[in-house]
Image (cartoon, rainbow, N blue to C red):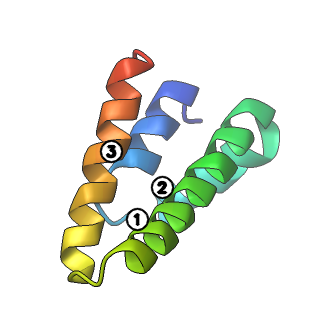
Amino acid sequence: MLSCKELVKIMNSKEEMSFFQRAEMRMHLMMCKHCAAYSKHLQIMRKGFKVLFSKISKTEPETIKRIEDQTIEKIKKSSGQ
């Protein structure tokens, strides 16, 4: 079983997950309300950033993704993760 710390690393990584990792992640999210809430908030933030940056600027999607990733990294660093 994945620990909460391992799950957060997997959710924040850009790498593709194997079938086994996805199954472990789903199992953990079903059992851990804190990680489930974190996952939901992460999805909301990602969607929100995409909408915000697509409306504000008509830049390339890659540029928007890079800015989104940088912002998330800064938030993670400031919260001590």
**Position in image of residue 47 (x %, y %):** 54, 67
Q: Is residue 19 left or right of residue 77?
A: right
Q: Nearer the viewer, residue 18 or 54?
A: 54
Foreground of the two, 6 or 40: 40
Q: Residue at label 2?
A: 21
Mark yes or no: residue 38 visible: yes
Question: Identity of the amino acid at label 2?
Answer: Gln
Q: Which residue is mark 3?
A: 71
Query: Residue, x 40% and y 15% (percent of image)?
Result: 80
Q: Are marks 1 and 2 in contact (CB under 8 Å)?
A: yes
Residue visible at 48% across and 26% down? 5
The amino acid type, in three-letter code, at marker 3 is Thr
Position of 76 compared to 40: left or right? left
Mark 1 neighbour class, 10 Å CA radius: few under 14, some 14 to 19, many 20 or more: few
Q: Mark 1 highlights which residue? A: 18
Q: Position of residue 31 (x, y in %)?
A: 80, 39
Q: Dot 1 lies on which element?
A: loop
Dividing the picture into quadrants, the one containing residue 81 is top left
Q: Is residue 4 left or right of residue 8?
A: right
* On screen, residue 41 above or below 78: below
> Foreground residue, 55 or 9?
55
